Amino acid sequence: MVERGRSTCYHTGRDTTSGAATVTAHSTTVGPARGAAPSTPEVAIPGAPSLGVDAGPPAGLSTAERPVGPRAAAAPTRGTLLTADRIITLGRGRTLARALVIRGSRVVWVGDDEANAPPYRSRLDLDGCVIGPAFVDAHAHLTMSGLSLRGLDLSDVSSGEELLRAVATYAGQHTGRVIWGHGLDPHRFPDPLPDPDALSRAAPGQAVYLSRVDGHAGLIDRTTLAAAPLARAEGIELSDAGPTGVIRREANHVVRRWSVGAMSEVELAEARRTATRQAASLGIASVHEMGGPDIMGLADFDAWVAGEWPVEVVPYWSSLEVDVPLERELRHVGGDLLLDGSLGAHTAALLAPYADAPAVSGHLEYDDETLTRWLLDATRAGLQTGVHAVGDAALSQLVRCWRAVAEHLAAHGHEDAIPRGRHRIEHAEVVTPSLLDDIADLGLLISAQPGTEARWGGPGGMYQARLGAERAAWTNPFRALADRGISIAFGSDATVFPMDPWGIIHAAEHHPEPRHSVGRMEAVSMSTLGGRTAARQDRFAGIVRAGMRADLAVFEGDPYAADDPRGARCALTVVQGRVSHGDAPLPPAPGT
């Protein structure tokens, strides 16, 4: 008899035709495996403990009660049965199950009793695990995320002096032309930022570009000030002594493009692979990649469009240029098209001045006429649009322009064209109560990042410093948005925050302003089906149901019910019926 007591979370795979078995271990404490039979011979696997393989009936059934049918009479031709402690479906009707069958790229059966399953060739018993729809990160910058994972991470730097040490240490270990750092957040630094000359001394012979955590500002050294084409760029911060090294708006875009151009394609390709593999390891099956001319450029965008990756990448071109996505047969334009900037950089457009900078209200990047024409042309062409709008002035402008588009369309008998397009607002951080009705009435969708509240919300946070207590009480009001029927898709905005689905869910549950929190399963839905809705994929993906695409995530334990789901370990990720992370008797995903 095979013992299975306190041990690792075992995946027991079995080919029902040949009897061949595989066993893969993952770290979770589980009880005995289903139906282990004393007569089953053990299968030796190099590097794995001798465990034994389930050849007996399903749990609760004796050998005499084993169902007979097509599987007993003839060898099935295809399909894999997955069983788990429970399956979260998120669908209407059956909300929980314990088994499912995958054939090709689709789920073909979901149920409680595997005796009712259609014929299958192999099986995978995921004892001690739970299966759910794979996550969608609805807003990310993947190449930058990969560069940060492999490069200079500044997210834990807490002073200007520490920043200089980090740059010097990294420069001593890396010989590239440009030192690219990300995650700089000097909001609470006790000392000034280093000046361009100090940065140059820390990294002699190399250019330095340190991106603020939100990507809307940066810090550069003397070498970069001299080498990058900044002669006519707006946004270079000046003091009496000259440039401080801080760059915003156009200057930040120019230096970002210049820095990317100085990197090798080998370095960029490895960054893309790193980011997608990390996504797969977290149970993410799809990422909405926000590219653009001022983000990583056209060559990087084309790499995402044409490449094969372990996760699905939905690329958005963040520009007014409609030809770029159309030439690549994409049905969406914009994405992270900037209507304004960020609160941290004082560039988000506000209706009233910043509380900590009374002479500043941020900037709108386009006039109403330009934005209205672009929205109208895209809607007429049946294209989805996406725009970056953080401040209440940018959101008010967007609503104003969509109202003008709606009036024009209604005059020509197309009243429902805007809701059908599922047009996106990225971020929507300063949403005043007066904007809720407009956003809901227009049928716009919000792509939000709960990590912003976890990091910058609450008393003493950056939001309160920039906005004052009254306005900060209405940042990212998830509950109010959901109650108005506004569709919400959650994402990370990596590299602003790391890709971390359970961290995002926890942040949405624990908003610093409790009235704006949403429940666990609401947040799960916004992190799965919400992203599918935002990409107009919800007809065939986003829930676990027969006929839907097999995009699944398997987690050890049960983070859906845990007090704190953060840190849950993903044991298996399946994307369109293929394994992108972990082990299973299914084909491998590209790029794994």
Image (cartoon, grey):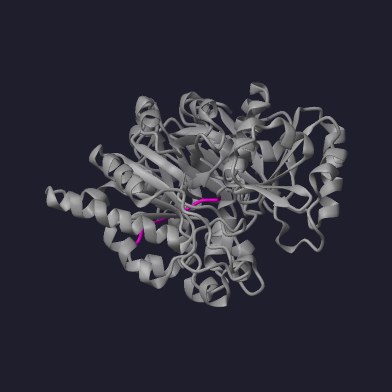
Question: Is residue 379 rendered to the left or right of residue 567?
Answer: left
What's the residue at 39%, 66% (across, down)?
481
* Residue toward you, 533 or 449: 449
* Residue toward you, 258 or 370: 370
* Residue toward you, 21 or 326: 326
Task: Say if residue 558 shows up in the picture.
Answer: no
Q: Residue 296 falls in which quadrant of the image?
A: top right
Q: Is residue 393 above or below residue 314?
A: below
Q: Residue 282 falls in which quadrant of the image?
A: top right
Q: Is residue 426 above or below residue 561?
A: above
- The magenta region covers 486-492
Q: Is residue 568 magenta?
A: no
What's the residue at 34%, 58% (across, down)?
399
At which x and y percent is residue 199?
82, 42
Task: Say if residue 212 shows up in the picture.
Answer: yes
Question: Is residue 228 rendered to the left or right of residue 390?
Answer: right
At which x and y percent is residue 191?
82, 60
What's the residue at 36%, 33% (across, down)?
322
| Quadrant occupied by the C terminus | top right
Q: Is residue 90 above or below residue 431?
A: above
